[in-house]
Image: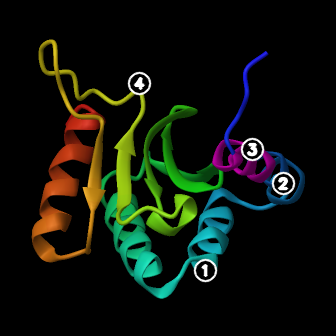
């Protein structure tokens, strides 16, 4: 039987809580609540990414995924934000799931460390999200 780390157990508990408490909320409300719970630094990054991603393509629908803000296309997670404080990491992460169209040969990145949300970072994320949704 597999043994889960404390962080993995916490993520599973968070997902169960979301299923119970968040299922009555719209996806936008779910993500807004998660962002509001973050520390100020993570909140700045998460809000910037949220505003950017939702403006890029109206088909991307916000909803939480394992306690993280995520953005769905046709019911599949395309991208997500993971606050650095969630797993006591020195940086936050912006990542992509299998449905994202980022394939580029035999090796390509699916997540990126985000230290701050700057205009340059916004530009890079926008380009990745556009590619991920096939634009």
Residue at image position (42%, 66%) is: 50
**Residue 34 occupies quadrant:** bottom right
**Residue 52 occupies quadrant:** bottom left
Evaluate if marks 4 and 3 touch, with contact meaning CB atoms under 8 Å apart.
no
In the foreground, 77 or 133: 77
Residue at image position (84%, 54%) is: 17
Find the distance from the CA under tag 2 to the CA under tag 3: 12 Å
Q: Quadrant of the C terminus?
A: top left
**Residue 132 occupies quadrant:** top left
Residue at image position (24%, 31%) is: 134
First of labels 1, 4 by sequence position? 1
First of labels 2, 3 by sequence position? 3
Residue 75 image offset from top left, x and y in percent: 58, 33
The residue that mark 3 highlights is 9
Residue 57 image offset from top left, x and y in percent: 34, 51
First of labels 2, 1 by sequence position? 2
- Residue 13 falls inside the magenta stretch: yes
Element type at marker 3?
A: helix
The residue that mark 2 highlights is 17
Residue 53 image offset from top left, x and y in percent: 35, 58
First of labels 3, 1 by sequence position? 3
The residue that mark 4 highlights is 98
């Amino acid at each position: 039987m597999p043994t889960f780390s404390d962080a993995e157990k916490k993520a599973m508990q968070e997902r169960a809580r979301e299923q119970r408490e968040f299922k009555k909320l719209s996806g936008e409300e779910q993500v807004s609540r998660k962002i509001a719970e973050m520390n100020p630094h993570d909140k700045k990054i998460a809000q910037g990414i949220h505003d950017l991603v939702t403006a890029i393509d109206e088909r991307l629908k916000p909803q939480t995924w394992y306690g993280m803000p995520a953005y769905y296309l046709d019911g599949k997670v395309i991208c997500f934000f993971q606050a650095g404080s969630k797993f006591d990491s020195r940086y936050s992460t912006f990542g992509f799931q299998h449905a994202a169209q980022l394939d580029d040969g035999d090796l390509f990145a699916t997540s990126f460390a985000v230290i701050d949300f700057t205009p340059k970072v916004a530009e890079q994320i926008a380009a990745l999200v556009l590619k991920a949704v096939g634009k």
